[in-house]
Image: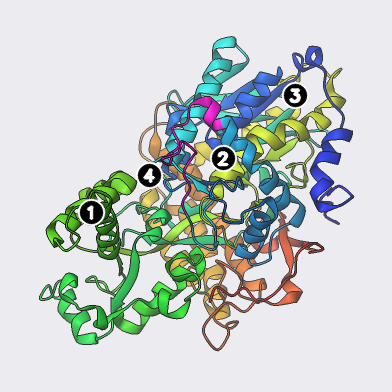
């Protein structure tokens, strides 16, 4: 089957405008007769639900949390990119487009990324109008800061809680439509299957997580904004509830799953402290604006630190290895996430890790505190040689910029990051893979859309920081509302979609059969027992670095683990009640299938690109070695078992950008 990405003809800069000028529209009177289901109410799903309802469609919105405000989008800390060039430092739509494609290691679809850059400025205006409290500079303009992989300041932010503030903006827009009756909100509901009628997505099967009731919901189109699947690794920066179930059920109903092995490892996370942990905590990439990353140069200093005999502040500058500044002088500490993550792993693998497990490096703010302190002392006509005063003034500046992040670190680690360097280590964060979608954001299943992190995205093999919020809001506010109208224009005379059909009967039966099996299995091990074992396989053999032998072993081990899970898992409680273990069991069952496809995808991609690093394919300097024959999107078709999945390729063509060495030196 050939994949048709439906990219419009014409010059790159004109594609989106020409597309909008020529698509079919649904007039306001007809929109009142059309239903749309939106699953997931984070930034992508929430903005889409609000906008579609504002346009006049009848929207049913589903989230498994008790409120859309709990969506994992709130965890985004550092900012959102947009090409508004407030800093006057040379930014432009094209430069944002170029940085995003280069940052993704030339594995993104060119037309989608340009559209993303093009609408980025609209997002900021929309959010300001909603009251999002972006930081402002002295003159009143919105402030910007830098993120990794770029040479300009284009990241808009609200302290260290940008995602939360943006989500509250989308949530307020949703609430307005809920109050008008245009959005019917289903909290504490989880989608467990998508219903296909005559080849089109026409509804979902959902479980009421409070009562256990299985419900049928129909619509003329289904939109999935359900986030990523980082929790397949068990330990990740994702919220505990984040899962792949909605996207995976769509995959099993025919939607292609693209680039599942493309996982982002975030370089600035609080290190693992022991086997008791259930998740990891992200420290915003914005900290790399002012923090300098280093490890000791001398092994005796490393050992003394691990044994508690030496404090990092006692190590003089000449005995510190600021390895990112050494290896990548042009970008320094602001290299892209995949580059920074691999560099940290390399130093720790070489024995220079600074915590007890040997898996941590320092993120140090002493230089920034001194720099800001002297600047403030100069402005206030105070003594710049008074070290105590300079330190106090500098800490005040850092507290204003990053205070909530520093507070969070201190609460978790019980160390004061103002006076001792933070310890960080890479961890699983974002997933660039997801459901394959065309230019319209529709999967290969008609009427089934995927937006935000749930699709295979615009980020290629690596996501640049502050681009997730940009993509989620671009999809929800400014792209999907246009593209879905073109599809729904053919449904204005269809009428309500009935739920008493054989397709709904069969989908509901499949869901109930799975639930019945899990609740009645009476095995000997908990759900977490299997999830942790899966996570260790994934991290050790499909994580920051992979090789053919490890991936082949992972495929076999995950398949065996899946059989053991269905044979020996134990889920306490009953089906018709609030039962979080049962909900978790359904999610882990899907992870056990996804994990195998993940490893299979990683095995066939014989190159290193972005977050996908194959040890067999690296330069002499240990950098990723991209191969031109793998310049494609790997889209997998479900055929009953992950091992039977069929690969379809969407070749990526770059007509407006030169594919060259991805150097950050």
Q: Is residue 241 above or below residue 544?
A: above
The percent coordinates of residue 93 (x first, y second) are: 68, 50
Q: Which residue is found at the position 22% from the left and 57% from the top?
A: 417
Highlighted magenta segment, given as a residue range: 127-145
Mark 1 vs mark 2: give the one in front.
Answer: 1
Label 4, residues with CA under 10 Å away: few <14, some 14-19, many ≥20: many
Residue nearest the viewer, comparing 200 with 32:
32
The percent coordinates of residue 122 (x first, y second) are: 64, 36
Mark 3 vs mark 2: give the one in front.
Answer: 2
Q: Mark 2 = which residue?
A: 226
Quadrant of the drawing holding the N terminus = bottom right
Label 2, residues with CA under 10 Å away: few <14, some 14-19, many ≥20: many
Q: As drawn, is 351 to the left or to the right of 140?
A: left
| CA distance separating discs 4 and 2 | 23 Å
The percent coordinates of residue 277 (x first, y second) are: 29, 54
- Tag 1 near tag 4, CB within 8 Å: no
Q: Is residue 259 above or below residue 661?
A: above
Labels 3 and 4: the sequence-earlier one: 4
Labels 3 and 2: the sequence-earlier one: 2
- Does the magenta-highlighted stretch encompass residue 132? yes
Mark 1 vs mark 4: give the one in front.
Answer: 1
Q: Mark 1 = which residue?
A: 377
């Amino acid at each position: 089957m050939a994949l048709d990405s439906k990219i419009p003809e014409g010059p790159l800069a004109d594609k989106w405008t020409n597309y909008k000028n020529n698509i079919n529209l649904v007039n306001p009177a007809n929109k009142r007769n059309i239903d749309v289901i939106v699953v997931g109410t984070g930034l992508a799903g929430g903005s889409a639900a609000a906008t579609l309802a504002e346009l006049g469609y009848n929207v049913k919105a589903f989230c498994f949390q008790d409120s859309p405000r709990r969506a994992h989008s709130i965890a985004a800390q550092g900012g959102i990119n947009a090409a508004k060039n407030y800093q006057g430092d040379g930014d432009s739509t094209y430069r944002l487009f170029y940085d995003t494609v280069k940052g993704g290691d030339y594995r993104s679809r060119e037309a989608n990324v340009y559209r993303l850059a093009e609408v980025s400025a609209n997002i900021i205006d929309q959010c300001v109008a909603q009251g999002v409290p972006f930081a402002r500079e002295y003159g009143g303009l919105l402030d910007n800061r830098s993120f990794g992989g770029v040479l300009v300041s284009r990241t808009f932010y609200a302290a260290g809680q940008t995602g939360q503030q943006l989500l509250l903006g989308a949530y307020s827009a949703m609430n307005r439509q809920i109050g008008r009756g245009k959005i019917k909100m289903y909290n504490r509901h989880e989608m467990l299957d998508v219903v296909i009628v005559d080849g089109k997505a026409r509804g979902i099967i959902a479980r009421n997580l409070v009562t256990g009731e299985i419900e049928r919901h129909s619509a003329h189109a289904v939109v999935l904004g359900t986030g990523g699947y980082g929790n397949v690794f068990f330990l990740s920066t994702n919220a505990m509830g984040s899962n792949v179930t909605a996207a995976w059920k769509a995959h099993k109903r025919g939607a292609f799953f693209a680039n599942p092995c493309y996982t982002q490892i975030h370089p600035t996370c609080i290190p693992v402290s022991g086997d008791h942990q259930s998740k990891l905590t992200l420290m915003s990439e914005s900290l790399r604006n002012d923090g300098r990353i280093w490890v000791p140069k001398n092994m005796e200093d490393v050992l003394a630190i691990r044994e508690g005999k030496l404090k990092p502040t006692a190590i003089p500058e000449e005995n510190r290895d600021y390895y990112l500044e050494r290896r990548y002088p042009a970008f320094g500490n602001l290299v892209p996430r995949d580059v920074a993550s691999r560099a940290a792993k390399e130093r720790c693998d070489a024995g220079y890790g600074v915590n007890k497990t040997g898996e941590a490096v320092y993120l140090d703010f002493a230089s920034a505190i001194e720099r800001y302190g002297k600047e403030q002392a100069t402005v206030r006509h105070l003594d710049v040689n008074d070290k105590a005063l300079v330190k106090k003034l500098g800490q005040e500046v850092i507290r204003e910029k990053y205070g909530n992040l520093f507070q969070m670190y201190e609460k978790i680690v019980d160390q004061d990051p103002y006076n001792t360097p933070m310890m960080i280590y890479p961890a699983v964060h974002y997933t660039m893979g997801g459901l394959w979608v065309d230019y319209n954001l529709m999967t290969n299943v008609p009427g089934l859309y995927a937006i935000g992190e749930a699709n295979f995205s615009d980020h290629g093999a690596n996501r640049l920081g502050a681009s997730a919020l940009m993509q989620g809001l671009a999809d929800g506010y400014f792209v999907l509302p246009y593209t879905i109208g073109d599809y729904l224009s053919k449904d204005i005379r269809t009428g309500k979609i009935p739920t008493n059909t054989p397709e709904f009967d069969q989908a509901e039966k499949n869901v109930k059969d799975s639930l019945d099996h899990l609740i009645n299995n009476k095995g000997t091990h908990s759900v977490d027992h299997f999830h942790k074992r899966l996570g260790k396989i994934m991290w050790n053999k499909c994580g920051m670095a992979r090789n053919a032998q490890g991936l082949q072993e992972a495929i076999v081990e995950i398949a065996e683990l899946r059989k053991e899970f269905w044979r020996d898992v134990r889920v306490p409680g009953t089906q018709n009640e609030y039962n979080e273990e049962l909900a978790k069991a359904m999610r882990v069952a899907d992870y056990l299938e996804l994990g195998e496809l993940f490893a299979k995808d990683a095995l066939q991609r014989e190159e290193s690109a972005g977050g996908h690093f194959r040890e067999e394919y690296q330069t002499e300097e240990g950098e990723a070695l991209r191969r031109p024959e793998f310049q494609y999107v790997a889209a997998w078709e479900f055929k009953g078992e992950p091992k039977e999945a069929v690969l379809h390729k969407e070749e990526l063509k770059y007509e407006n950008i030169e594919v060259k060495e991805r150097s950050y030196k």
